Amino acid sequence: MVRQEVIPLMTPHKMGQFDLSHRVVLAPMTRCRSYGYVPQPHNALYYSQRATSGGLLISEGTGVSATAQGFPGSPGIWTPEQVDAWKPVVDVVHRKGALFFCQIAHVGRVSTNDRQLPPDAESGTVYSKPRRLGTDEIAGVVNDFRRAARNAIEAGFNGVEIHGAHGFLFEQFMKDGANDRDDEYGGSLENRCRFAVEVIDAVVGEVGAHRVGIRLSPFADYMECVDSDPVALGHYMVQQLNRHEGFLYCHMVEPRMAIVDGRRQIPHRLLPFRKAFNGTFIAAGGYDREEGNKAVADGYTDLIAYGRIFLANPDLPRRFEMDAPLNKYDRDKRHRVAGWLAAKPHDFDSKTKRMTETGGKTKETASGVQDSRLKEDGNPSRGMRHYIWSNPDTYKYFCTRPEAMPLLTPFKMGQFELSHRVVLAPLTRCRSYGNVPQPHAAVYYSQRATRGGLLITEATGVSATAQGYPETPGIWTQEQVEAWKPIVDAVHRKGALFFCQMWHVGRVSTNDFQPDGQAPISSTDKQISPDAEPGMVYSKPRRLRVDEIPGIVDDFRRAARNAIEAGFDGVEIHGANGYLLEQFMKDGANDRDDEYGGSLENRCRFAVEVVDAVVREVGADRVGIRLSPFLDYMDCVDSNPVALADYMVRQLNKHEGFLYCHMVEPRMAIVDGRRQIQHGLLPFRKVFNGVFIAAGGYDREEGNKVVSEGYTDLVAYGRLFLANPDLPKRFEIGAPLNKYDRSTFYTQDPVGCKKSSSSTSSSSSARQRLDSSSARAEFRAELELHPRLVSLNELTPFKMGQFELA
């Protein structure tokens, strides 16, 4: 039997705790296809194509902060949105059995000196004049690297590679050709390397030396970063790495190739550093199959990193194994933003173990977003930035960050990171049969959920006396809590935040909705006038006694606790739209002469007690409130709405970290025959310490305007969001909107395909309570008329062997 030749590049290697099946490493390569600095789904294809079982992949340079960026469309890992976007990319690489390290980077030139780089001769790029970092600022940048390393591990990466090469921030400190500082970060070799060592120490301290590598290029002169003694620099840095027992690897770039006998030749000057370093050594810089095999066989290096030829040959390890021909790389396509470029692997003939080309010569093909402006031969110029920036349409189409549209800018709401400012307003739906949320609610809310978006539930009753509409949900029983859990989970799986709006309707009810047919409760015994809502006659309420009020306060407290148990991220107290809290707050409704009536302070006492109780129960950082001081819903009007709102906002400010105030605009005015928002909320936005949400008739144009002008932080949308579940995306691309249909707003049919038959003109039946069995019977009857709808039986859980179906 003829023994098969052992190929050094294809031999296994143990790198710390990791077992590699071969020595061919995917080098980090800037791709410029992470739009808005967020990794995209096509990244999963790019990396998984190059992943092999037991192989090692290193990601493209990934920014550690907003100041770290210098290339359009390069990814970051400093925000939760970026972390979450990396997770499926990492997961698909792991499913192929490969290891995946994240290269964390900062491009710099806002750092060590104020000398400007000259224009790039190849691309024509003119770099901005940098700002010299203050000594007191450096610790913050070090912390950016530490946090990025932690984020990378959270995203699922096996480890991180610190980018200390190619003229970026590290080298701007390390190399004496760039660093002209005269403080503790400049001058001597030790001082110049201090920043790099501090970053290494911080990253190792955060994730462990066994998960950390570094890339260095002491001999290179990229971006005018050159050192007078690169050998001494390389040795010093390797010695610093060895201080950390188990430091995983040193990835070092060869000097620029020399021309020998008319051929480019690798100088091979890394051996002294390979001998000095205690961990795994990776060499990079112009290697092919022959040179790589020789370097590994001679013990010159442990692993070889391949860049351009791995880009053009996603199946490179297999081609090396079979000694198959390689596709040539095309420099013009290396950094394009036009979708992703996926080189098509050759098919392997199992009998001959040689490759047969399919469809002629394999070539790179553009996939993903297609556009007539992005022809592969559309620009003969070379150089990444010249190509991108000399094509304004291309740059705008692919690289403009979503932040250009105010409504789509990210925002930090207390402890929560939002990716945009478009909020789903609370909208009564009347489809929770027996006051218990139903499975179809999971569809309704998850349809409107986006990663980093904020959704507020329909108004949810805090007790049996809180109800005033048919089939509205509650959260006062354990059954209701359990029913909310899968709905909340569905929203969270989409990456959105979900707050539960807690309400008590007060006198906006009838005896039919109340336990044992008793009278609704309120601050007053005055009945809502028939004119408040045409066709409705509300029952005469009963004035709450002073000794009963603490019980209602406790209902809100308990409901808040239940909401957190159900998985909600927080709660919104409903203090608007003429319901119970407003029936106390507004002097047009409150006619009491005790400690809960009369003065502004007294009228607001009940609302303040509810706020205090809920904050004590779940924490101010999880609580918001909705207020509508200017409105006159349900005969709730106040003689001085400005004073009322100002007082309430100041009460909220007493709770440090109170999350948000959600306030409704005054009714629209008619100006030149058109409805116009009056914008009366700015004084309260200025007074309130937390996040401010404006609501009331906003569209895309008005929403962008008020966010850009600082009038509000977020904008809540109701009817538009109801008719357009993908509203944030429609806003983003300027797409037309569906018109909403009022006739379906409050029907008990979850699809809203026709007006519910439960609505009649009689006062008792207009708000008739539909018990669970009758509601289901009605819905099943509609199913016979609409067979396309899913039946209720199909919305019940089912156990399929070992699997649980929802």
Image (cartoon, rainbow, N blue to C red):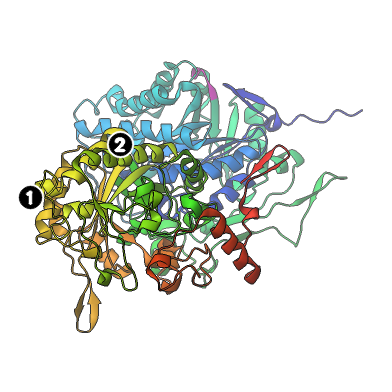
Q: Position of residue 447 (x, y in %)?
A: 49, 58
Give the residue type that dot 1 points to.
Ser
Taking 62 as reference, is 407 above or below it? below
**In this rendering, which labeled residue sits more in front, label 1 or label 2?**
1
The 10 Å Cα crowd at callout 2, few under 14, some 14 to 19, many 20 or more, is: some
Left or right: 500, with 649 as reference point: right
Numbered range of the magenta stretch:
276-280
Q: Residue furthest left?
A: 599
Taking 609 as reference, is 592 above or below it? below
Q: Name the element at disc 1.
A: loop
Left or right: 183, with 736 as reference point: left
Q: Are marks 1 and 2 in contact (CB under 8 Å)?
A: no
What residue would you read off at disc 2? 177
Q: Nearer the viewer, residue 319 or 586?
A: 586
Left or right: 481, with 300 as reference point: left
On residue 599, the disc is: 1
The answer to whether residue 286 is visible is no
